[in-house]
Image (spheres, rainbow, N blue to C red):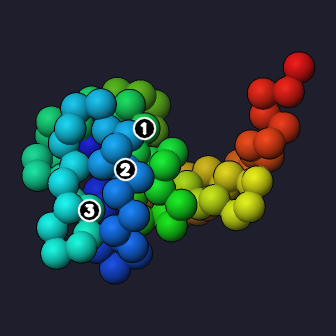
Amino acid sequence: MSIRINQTSCVGCKRCIEACPGNLIKLKDGKAEIKREKDCWGCTSCLKECATGAIEFFLGADIGGKGSILSTKQQGDLRHWIVTAVDGSIKTITINTKESNKY
């Protein structure tokens, strides 16, 4: 499992750095980067904190993703989980974060 950080989309907010339990993400030239992608645990903590969609998570066959890419974008109280399949098709799941834990 691994993540990729798109340097063009990264705004250097450091939220992913603070969220990473493995301390794997560092800031370089004002942008987040992961030194060794293979060391990523696949917890997706950084992905959930990235408001710009700069972090992508590779969904390998071992977890049923067959090579799909997962990214997320925040829009107010809405979090959009975007899955891009190998064939290019895109599926989006939108969750209202304000209402998600409401009992």
For the residues bearing labels 2 and 1, Cβ distance under 8 angstroms: yes
- Whichever of labels 3 and 2 marks the residue nearer the N terminus, that label is 2
Compare residues 8 and 17 and report the one nearer the observer. Answer: 17
Neighbour tally class for label 3: few under 14, some 14-19, many 20 plus, Cα within 10 Å: many
Q: Residue 2 in the image: x percent, y percent?
A: 27, 43
Compare residues 83 and 11 and report the one nearer the observer. Answer: 11
- Measure the C-alpha gap from mark 2 to mark 1: 7 Å
| Outermost residue, right side | 103
Tell whether 12 sits left or right of 34: right
Residue 45 shows which numbered tag? 1
For the residues bearing labels 3 and 2, Cβ distance under 8 angstroms: yes
Q: Which residue is mark 3?
A: 32
Q: From what the image shows, is residue 38 above or below residue 11?
A: above
Q: Which residue is mark 2?
A: 16
Element type where label 1 sits in the image: helix
**Residue type indicated by callout 2:** Cys
* Quadrant of the rendering where the N terminus is positioned: top left
Element type where label 2 sits in the image: helix
| Outermost residue, bottom side | 8
**Residue type indicated by callout 3:** Ala
